[in-house]
Amino acid sequence: MLSPPVCPGSHPQRDQRNPVQQYVMRLRRRLGDRDRTMLVTKAPGYRLVFDPERLDAHRFEALHAEGQGLFAAGAHDKAFTVLGGALELWRGPAMEDVPVSPTVRTAAERLEEARLAAAELRIEASHRIGGHLATLAELRALRDSNPLREGLWEKEMTALLESGRRAEALDVYQRARRVFQDELGLEPGTALRDLQQLILTGGSARSGRF
């Protein structure tokens, strides 16, 4: 632990604190740790004791997992609500106010991927309970931010198909095809091509596997 130097014959002030103690005091103030139960003294230094339930990231992951379980069990309406609660915890990019390091970057990327997965699953839950158009604007915004995520194009086409807007669904396929050709030099995957054929032949997403 750091402490200020003391010269021979000098008499340090009684209230003088070393730099580490000063940092600890500031941190306790920031944490609201008046009773000193979060940042506790433990030789040879200090230990941070933090309730995970106070962390938005922990609460998000718990709600995301709960939503996944509800969706898998067929409780799509409940999954939609729980996943919405998970997404409401976000205030911006993951860990945007934390100094960047390889560990922080990896954790932030993992959280952002989980956020996207939760948003996708919530939209899918909405579709399962008949809300194809209710989340269409949200879906399009998500797709615009992630244009190479094929599942988002598929969900948009399905939403339009199930709402009787076949021509628009086919237009979405053509836009997706251009994006994949321009960005990757590839045709859309099997799922999108099969969905296009289903639309062209007058089929329904409910009658297919989508």
Image (spheres, rainbow, N blue to C red):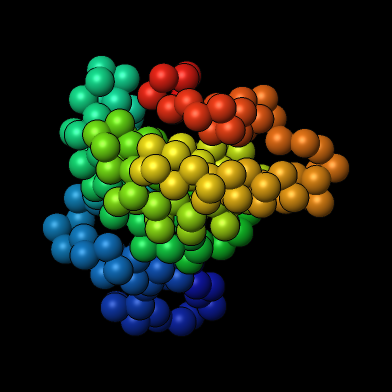
Residue at the front extreme of this rendering = 202
Taking depth in this image into account, of 19 and 57 the one nearest to the observer is 57
Q: Is residue 208 above or below residue 60?
A: above
The image shows residue 161 at horizontal and vertical percentages of 44, 39
Residue at the location (25% across, 17% down)? 73
Q: Is residue 49 above or below residue 192?
A: below
Q: Quadrant of residue 200?
A: top right
Q: Residue at x 43, y 63 (%)?
A: 92
Residue at image x 36%, y 56%?
A: 90
Q: Position of residue 40 (x, y in %)?
A: 27, 49
Residue 80 position by quadrant? top left
User: With 72 as the anchor, is 204 left or right in this view?
Assistant: right
Which residue lies most toward the left here? 35
Measured as percent of width and height from the top left, residue 149 is found at 61, 42
Is residue 48 toward the left or the right of residue 94 in the image?
A: left
Residue 65 visible? The answer is yes
Between 104 and 39, the residue placed more toward the observer is 104
Task: Tell me if residue 100 comes above or below residue 104 in the rendering.
Answer: below
Q: Tell how many labels.
A: 0
Q: Residue at x 44, y 47 (%)?
A: 165
**Residue 88: where, in percent of width, then height?**
29, 54
Whether residue 55 can be seen here: no
Quarter of image, res 118: top left
